[in-house]
Amino acid sequence: MIRNVQQSLLPDVVPDRPVGRILPSVITGTNADLIAAIAPLYLTGAVCDVTHGEGGWWRKLRPEHLVAHDLDSAKGDGVDFTALPEADDTYDAVTFDPPYIPQGGYDTSTAQPFADRFGLTSRSPAELWILIEAGLAECSRVSRRWVLVKCMDFVSGGSFHLGHVKVIELGAMAGLRVHDLLVHHTGSGPGGHNIFTPLRARRNHSYLIVFEVRS
C-alpha cells in the first residue's frame, strides 16, 4: 500500500510529501470493520480464513481470492485448522480467529452472545494454548507472507492471563515474527452485570496480531 503524493511546484525548495490517512493502531467497531480497515495492507492476493464460521469477518469486504475453512460442517467444509490440506506457501495471508478465552473466564461466559463474540471455550488455559499452538504452526506453514491472529487477555481461575503475549510467544515458536499489533475496541466488553466487587478493569478490547512468516 502506497500513500498518495502531493507534488511540489518547487521540489528543490519544498519536497513532495505523502498525503492521506494512515491506518490507526486502534480500530472501533465490529470484526468486519476491523478487517475492512486492515485489508489494504495485509489482505491482498490469495487469502485463507481457517476459522470462517458464519463469515462475520467478511461482511464489509471479502477478498476476491478467499478460501474459507471451518471445522463445523454445518458452517463450512469440516477442515480442522490444526491439519490444513493445503501445500506449504499456498496463500499470501492466512487469518486465524481461534477460541481465545477459557469458559469461566468471565461470569457471563454462559451467555451465548458473549460466547460467540469473544471465543469462549470449555477448554482450560493449558488446553487452549495447545490448540492455538497447533493452529499457528499450520497457518505459518501454508502462508508465504502474513498470518493474522485475533486474541484477547482474560481472567481464568482467579488469575490474569496476558493472552496476546502468549500468542506472540507461540507464534515465534511457529517461525513467525510480529509485524504489527492492532487494538480492537468492541464496546463495553463481557462481564459486569453481576460483579459486586470489581478486582480488575473490564477487558473491552481484543488484539489483532499481524505476523510475518520468516523467510
Image (spheres, helix red, strand yellow):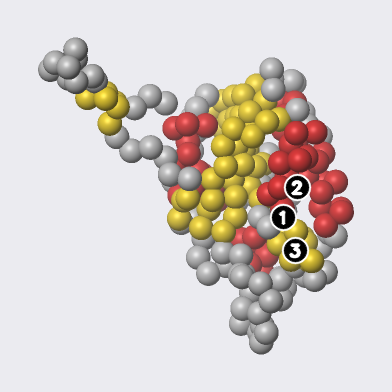
Image-quadrant location for residue 125: bottom right
Decide: marks 1, 3 in contact (CB < 8 A)?
yes
Q: Residues within 10 Å of mark 2 (few under 14, many from 20)?
A: some
Q: Is residue 1 above or below residue 117?
A: above
How far across and how far down the image is residue 183, in percent?
A: 54, 50
131 up-or-down from 10: above or below:
below
Residue 51 spot, x, y in % from top left: 67, 44
Asked if residue 181 is positioned above or below residue 111 in the image, the reply reads: above
Question: Which quadrant of the figure has residue 17?
Answer: top left
Of the image marks 2 and 3, the number of the one nearer the N terminus: 3
Which residue is depicted at the point 17% across and 17% down? 13
Q: Which residue is mark 1?
A: 162
Residue 34 location in percent, x, y? Answer: 49, 47
State yes or no: discs 2 and 1 in contact (Cβ < 8 Å): yes
- Label 3 packing within 10 angstroms: few (<14), some (14-19), many (20+): few
Query: In the rendered structure, which amino acid carries the disc numbered 1?
Result: Leu
Residue holding disc 2: 166
Q: Residue at x 57, y 42 (%)?
A: 181
Q: Can residue 103 be spotted in the picture?
A: no
Find the distance from the CA under tag 2 to the CA under tag 3: 12 Å
Quarter containing the C terminus? top right
Q: Amino acid at mark 2?
A: Lys
Q: Nearer the viewer, residue 46 or 99?
A: 99
Q: Is residue 153 left or right of residue 210?
A: right
Tell me which amino acid carries mark 3: Phe
Label 1 environment density (alpha carbons within 10 Å; few <14, some 14–19, many ≥20):
few
Disc 2 on helix, strand or loop? helix
Looking at the image, residue 182 sits to the left or right of residue 82; the answer is: left
Which residue in the protein does label 3 denote? 160
